[in-house]
Amino acid sequence: MTPQEFRKMAHQTADWMADYFEQVTDFPVKARVQPGEILSALPGLPPESGTDSETIFRDFGSILLPGITHWQHPGFMAYFPANTSYPSVLAEMVTSALGAQCMLWETSPAATELEQAVMGWLRDMTGLPGDFQGVIQDSASSATLMAVLCAREKASGFQVAETGGSAKKLMVYASTQTHSSAEKAVRIAGLGKTGFRKISVRADFSLDPAELEAAIREDLEKGFLPCAVIATLGTTGTTAFDPLPEIGRICKTYGLWLHVDAAYAGTAFLLPEFRPLAAGLDLADSYVFNPHKWMLTHFDCSAFFVRDPDHLVNVMSVLPDYLRTKSHGRVNNYSDWSIQLGRRFRALKLWWVIRSFGVNGLRDIIRNHIRLAELAESELKTWPSVDWMAPRTLNLLCFRFTQPGLSVPEENDLNDEILQTLNQSGKVYLSHTTLNGKLTLRLVTGQTTLTEPYLREVLDLIRQISGQILASRVSQEKK
Ligand SMILES: *Cc1c(COP(=O)(O)O)cnc(C)c1O
């Protein structure tokens, strides 16, 4: 490709991107392809000679685009969003042109120092404890893994790092509603499936602190070494908030590391009125939240904060001679704060997003998302066939349709049919969770492009489709 061709294609691509954002509702939000369909449209062997960009772009449109689920579609209300924004995309264009690998301060001083600055901004914007220091990770999963490694080494006095094992069995605790990345982290850290103890939850799906303390005491009696609690602010299933003040007190009493996973809900702490939900965070040793979920910064960008960066670096750093630089000890080398050596220049998109919207601009958007959830909640609560499955704290609704006379499995089938039909409509994409054995629909209003009129259209569609399916069940029963 010549520089002239690149310039032409880049302009065309930028136009395509702008059109895509403007016309994203022309696509069905959830991809409608069958497993293997895209793969079978791709040649098994790579091309021997080069293909021009026009052709590649055309094939992207005809072969790949039908297999894309459109996360930036206003009808994307499944899981948690991974929302983006124009400023975030612009920053990525620049990042990809720089192609910098920002592992050490020396390999791009601006990347390191911008990361240091924006992580300080994020901490202060969201009201985190002033002594937290942050580093950007690819995902909350990696951040939680690092937290478990820090906890493991602290509890064992670096015995595991030294010898690969510990004298006593190390134990990590989290609620039954904790994200799967916590259990995965414990397994990867070598503590084993039996080193992860799930604590039961209360009626609102938050961790029961009395059960936690009982479990720790029981394990101590067995001669185990309790080393960490992973508490969640805003669980994935229902956005439940674990009681941090009580959990923190227990961690202090028994000397456990407290890691707090606020992957989704952390963005809500931009709003001072939601900060009471983070009370007790001053007791945490580490904390993670994902700007790449709800803060208009495209995937991947996870903000990991620790109270004691020296401990983190002691756990993570392996320094061969070829990575030793003159500036060591005077600057942050973020590869020492991460699992991977190589690092993308992720701070740029955060900087671009925060400057472009301003903190107040971001706050307005987040407040609006929560207002839309309130609106949907009050609408759904007027429908006689809707059961509320968990309290709403932010912008996730957990509900289910019911019909008198149906057993729980029959009702699960009913809700599954409603979910599948909605998701095939192309207009909305919801996901589900299971709460106390009951299939529950999850609807999240966190998409950058979501508007009140679009939400009202979605609610109409849910009313119409659920109404048809409920009516057909009634007529089946009569037969
Ligand atoms: C989404 C989510 C995660 C996982 O986030 P990744 O960045 O994809 O690893 C972890 N914890 C909670 C509570 C989440 O909602």
Image (cartoon, rainbow, N blue to C red):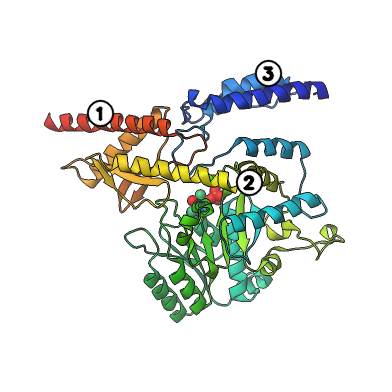
Label 1, on which residue?
A: 468
Farthest residue toward the right? 326
Q: Is residue 135 visible?
A: no
Q: Nearer the viewer, residue 102 or 393?
A: 393
Q: Nearer the viewer, residue 291 or 300?
A: 291
Quarter of the image holding residue 323?
A: bottom right
> Between disc 2 and disc 3, whose residue precedes?
3
Which residue occupies 79% across, 61% down?
331
Label 3, on which residue?
A: 55
104 over 296 or under it: above or below = below
Q: Nearer the viewer, residue 303 or 218?
A: 303
Which quarter of the figure is the C terminus placed in?
A: top left
Which residue occupies 75% across, 60% down?
332
Q: Amino acid at mark 3?
A: Thr
Label 2, on which residue?
A: 354
Q: Amino acid at mark 2?
A: Ile
Asked if the residues shown at circle 2 and circle 1 are in contact, with their CB atoms under 8 angstroms apart, the answer is no
Asked if the residues shown at circle 1 and circle 3 are in contact, with their CB atoms under 8 angstroms apart, the answer is no
* In this picture, residue 343 sits left or right of residue 442: right
Q: Is mark 3 within 8 Å of ligand 1?
A: no
Circle 2 residues within 10 Å: few <14, some 14–19, many ≥20? many
Q: Is mark 1 within 8 Å of ligand 1?
A: no
